[in-house]
């Protein structure tokens, strides 16, 4: 069964550094998402992406964040200048459609900002 | 925007008993309600979902009910087993691109 994959599984970075989190969505899916989960807290929506542009974003997704689909398979989340409070698990998800369609989550990237 | 409240935050049951988790949502335009199970350090996994044109859905030991008028939906797990122990999240989607999650319920099933 196809799965969403993410790399790296863990990333440690210094405050102020840029990080890029990578995701490979399921191949026939058209809608892509990034979520964040701070340790012990709920899953928070960051951004959705369709047809090579952002469809919707949350208040968390400020100018420090960007997303890109650089080729036909990868979907990336970039944090330009990391802050301590960016430390969290970041999940990528994808779905075939948008209305009432199941979102499949990747295994996550645990980001630690020191 | 949409807000999803989830209760209880922690639930402890004896093996074989039933567990019920309740959620309320604020946006009456929400029309899709998935439930996810998350084991420690793992990704959220969809366990059941319900769309707004249906009042109840069942899959083996798991059922979900939806009351659109009251804007609440519930997860019911019967005959609980130790492997049901996990964090369960409800979520709501308005048919757009944003899914809002509840705060989660940590379920402990004691053997």
Image: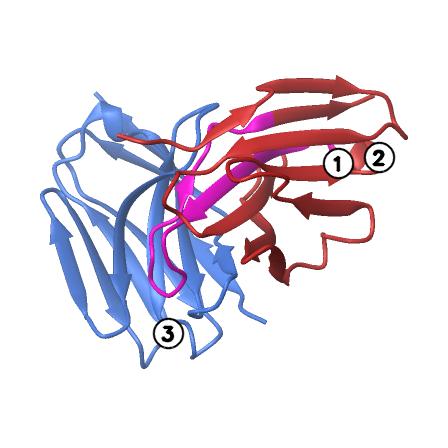
Chain colours: A red, B blue
Chain at numbered mark 3: B
Q: Quadrant of the N terminus of chain B?
A: bottom right
CA distance for labels 3 and 1: 33 Å
Residue under circle 2? A83
Give the vertical position of A64 relative to A17 (above or below). Answer: below
Residue bounds of the magenta highlight: A87-109
Residue B94 visible at all: yes
Residue B10 position, x and y percent, is 42, 40
Residue under circle 1? A86
Chain at numbered mark 2: A
Disc tally is 3
CA distance for labels 2 and 1: 5 Å
Q: Is residue A63 on the magenta stretch?
A: no
Q: Residue at x 73, y 38 (%)?
A: A78
| Contact, mark 3 vs mark 1 (Cβ under 8 Å) | no
Residue under circle 3? B71
Q: Is residue B102 left or right of residue B34?
A: right
């Amino acid at each position: 069964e196809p799965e969403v994959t993410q790399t790296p599984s863990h990333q440690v970075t210094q405050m102020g550094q840029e990080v890029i989190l990578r995701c490979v969505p399921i191949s026939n899916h058209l809608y892509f998402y990034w979520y964040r989960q701070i340790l012990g807290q709920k899953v928070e929506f960051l951004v959705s992406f369709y047809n090579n542009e952002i469809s919707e974003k949350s208040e968390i997704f400020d100018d420090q964040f960007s997303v890109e689909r650089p080729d036909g398979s990868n979907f990336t989340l970039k944090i330009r200048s990391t802050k301590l409070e960016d430390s969290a698990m970041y999940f990528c998800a994808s779905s075939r459609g948008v209305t009432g369609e199941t979102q499949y989550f990747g295994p996550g990237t645990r980001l630690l900002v020191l | 925007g949409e807000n999803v409240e989830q209760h209880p935050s922690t639930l402890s049951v004896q093996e074989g008993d039933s567990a019920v988790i309740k959620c309320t949502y604020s946006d009456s335009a929400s029309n899709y309600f998935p439930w996810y199970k998350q084991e420690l350090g793992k990704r959220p996994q969809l366990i059941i979902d319900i769309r707004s044109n249906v009042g109840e859905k069942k899959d083996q030991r798991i059922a979900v009910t939806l009351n659109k008028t009251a804007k609440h939906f519930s997860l019911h797990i019967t005959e609980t087993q130790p492997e049901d122990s996990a964090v369960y999240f409800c979520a709501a989607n308005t048919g757009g691109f944003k899914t809002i999650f509840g705060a989660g319920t940590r379920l402990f099933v004691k053997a």
